[in-house]
Amino acid sequence: MISQNQRLIINYQTQLDANSQNGATLTNVAGTIRWFDGDGTTTNRKTFTGPLTNGTPGVLDNQDAHTVTVVIGQLAITKQVSVVAAALRCEGQLDYLVHVTNVSTNPAPRS
């Protein structure tokens, strides 16, 4: 139950599509179009409705909008291999050295 003068805050995590364009602006609108002044057992419970529009930024109501700009980092990956044994056989050993460099001004995600 949300009491009078209280509000519900929902936190969630999102992920960009693989084909998202760097610098694109994305707006998420979330809201409710129907709510009640009590639970299902409340006698004479009132129903309230409101439209879902552009999120009505700056207005305390049944909806909100949040806009973000897509920021995509660029990674450069190089791989170097060296033969440990003089002659490579089935039992031979190779050593790989992989370099990952963030070549953009944006931070790279950890995952």
Image: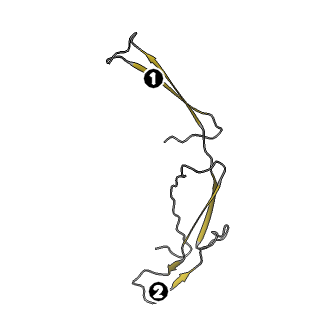
* Quarter of the image where one finds residue 68: bottom right
Name the residue tied to disc 2: 45
Which amino acid is tagged 2? Answer: Arg
* Quarter of the image where one finds residue 108: top right
Q: Nearer the viewer, residue 89 or 35?
A: 89
Q: Residue at x 50, y 81 (%)?
A: 37
- Spatial CA span between label 2 and label 1: 69 Å
Number of marks in the rendered image: 2
Q: Residue furthest left?
A: 91
Q: Secondary structure at mark 2?
A: loop
Q: Nearer the viewer, residue 20 or 44?
A: 20
Do tag 2 and tag 1 residues touch (Cβ < 8 Å)? no
Q: Residue at x 41, y 19 (%)?
A: 94
Tell me: 86 left or right of 57.
left
Image x and y of residue 90, in percent: 32, 18
Q: Secondary structure at mark 1?
A: strand
Name the residue tied to disc 1: 96
Image x and y of residue 73, in percent: 60, 41
Which amino acid is tagged 1? Answer: Tyr
